[in-house]
Image (tube, rainbow, N blue to C red):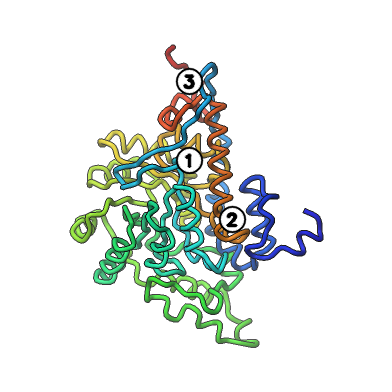
Amino acid sequence: CTRGAMAKEAVGEVDLDAIVCLDDMERAAQRVMDRQDFDYFAGGAETESTLRANRAAFSRVTIWPRCMVDVSDVDTTTHVPALGLHNLAAPLLIAPVAMQRAAHPDGECAAARACAAHSIPYCASQQSTTAIEEIGRAGGDAPRMFQLYVLSDREATTKLIRRAESMGATALCITVDAPVLGRRERDVRNRFELKAGLKLANVDAGKNQNKSQDQTGPDKSAVDAKRAQSAIARRIGGRDASLTWDHLRWLRSVTRLPLVLKGIVTYADAARAVKEGVDGVWVSNHGGRQLDGSPATLDALPEVVAGVNGAGGCVVIFDGGVRRGTDALKALALGADLVAVGRPAAWGLACGGERGVGKAVELLTEELRTAMTLAGCGDVRSARNRELVQVVGETPPRSRL
């Protein structure tokens, strides 16, 4: 972009034709967003080593393409009936991202509409800045899921589940890697707070979440890091830190929706999840925002898949650092059924609202199609082939002819 073009940019008004890849979109979003909002979405926990590791892990996986394969009509469509997801345009989904109206005034509704228009699932966050019901209306009849934190208040949790059912969610994604909030130091330094007029629309715990906005003058500038961290942590008020496997029975008693456990990264937890009868596991480290030093999700994926398959099998969803179609192809080859992205949705919103999210989905889908074509994969089933990829330390795959 020229200096003049950049000067005219604003939230929702980036020239989407100039966006060639998701990294371009992130850079454009950084130009137009307030620093505290950009850092909220971009940041990770503490040293952000896990955040960086998620991206770096893809460079340790090599794709071994097969030639002389008919790829004249590559089919990226897929179905995940166990989660009520049918006729998907690609094995992709938008992961739950909190507070999307901090990226664009239309927030969650714009993202849901974009997903509906492109026939990929949208997973609504419990921590959204838009009511569940509004998100459901925005998405029409398109496939959607709902991400849930189990609260200590079981009645409040049940009410959230009922609202998710009413908005048309086909599955509940229970976050299990966040009994407390990871220490996100960018937010602490920025003294992050939601802008006036924004709130967590689906929970009561944040009643005073904008309280610091009433402060002015030296008192506000003197808020120390401890108070800032405490204010940020209040956003998760009410979550049940005592959540165990035993609580799955209670969840089963209050809903018939399929259950997905989000935040699984070990063989043992994956195997236990299948034995407990869950319908899916979501390989995730919360985008590197929780336990700093935990494994990159691509490194964890083969372990989780082994645990799942050894215990009888269930749906495997993957997220963490996906920015390219080749990243998605690598995750599929390592055993994922669906590949999720979160931050690119926020960057899309910041760049162009609904059109921006649509652009992000289009870029990733087209890159995946190209990668599948060049790798000799005519459809998603052939892409889910462990012999397609080699992880550092392995010998090259030698398929039987």
Would you say 180 lies left or right of 361 here? Answer: left
- Taking 193 as reference, is 347 above or below it? above
Residue annotated with mark 2: 356
At label 1, the amino acid type is: Leu
At label 3, the amino acid type is: Pro
Q: What is the crowding at mark 2: few (fewer than 14 residues within 10 Å), some, or many (at least 20)?
A: many
Q: Using the image, tell me which numbered label, if any, was put on residue 298.
A: 1
Mark nearest the camera among 3 and 2 is 2
Mark 1 and mark 3: Cα distance apart in space: 19 Å
Q: Nearer the viewer, residue 182 or 102?
A: 102
Q: Residue at x 54, y 39 (%)?
A: 327
Q: Residue at x 61, y 70 (%)?
A: 190
* Location of residue 366 (image quadrant): top right
Where does residue 286 sit, x and y in percent of width and height?
46, 54
Residue annotated with mark 3: 397
Query: Extreme top residue here?
Result: 401
